[in-house]
Image (tube, grey):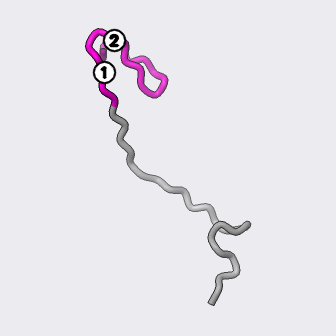
Amino acid sequence: MASENPAGAPGAPVIPLVGIGTDIHAFEEGRELWCAGLKWEGEG
């Protein structure tokens, strides 16, 4: 039996996707550390 409101159709509920991500960057001693647009003082 077909649904009256298949996923992706106008009026279908929006289900947010949530999870845990990992973002790893190598850094070099003596260089400024910037991550996500933020400067991390004393971490480089």
Residue 10 lies within the magenta run: no
Which residue is depicted at the point 62% across and 61% down? 14
> Which corner quadrant holds the C terminus?
top left
Q: In which quarter of the view is residue 12 placed?
A: bottom right
Q: Which mark is residue 27?
A: 1
Q: Quadrant of the N terminus?
A: bottom right
Q: Is residue 20 above or below residue 2?
A: above
Asked if residue 19 is positioned above or below residue 42 in the image, the reply reads: below
Residue that extends furthest to the top in the rendered view of this protein:
30
When asked about the image quadrant of residue 21, the answer is: top left
Residue shown at 42% from the left, 52% from the top = 19
Residue drawn at 30 percent across, 21 percent down: 27
The picture places residue 28, in percent across and down from the top left corner, at 28, 17
Give amino acid for label 2: Arg
Tag 2 residue: 31
Judge left or right: residue 16 versus residue 31.
right
Decide: is 35 above or below 22: above
Q: Main secondary structure of the magenta part?
A: loop
Q: Whole-Å distance between the Cαs marked 1 and 2?
A: 8 Å
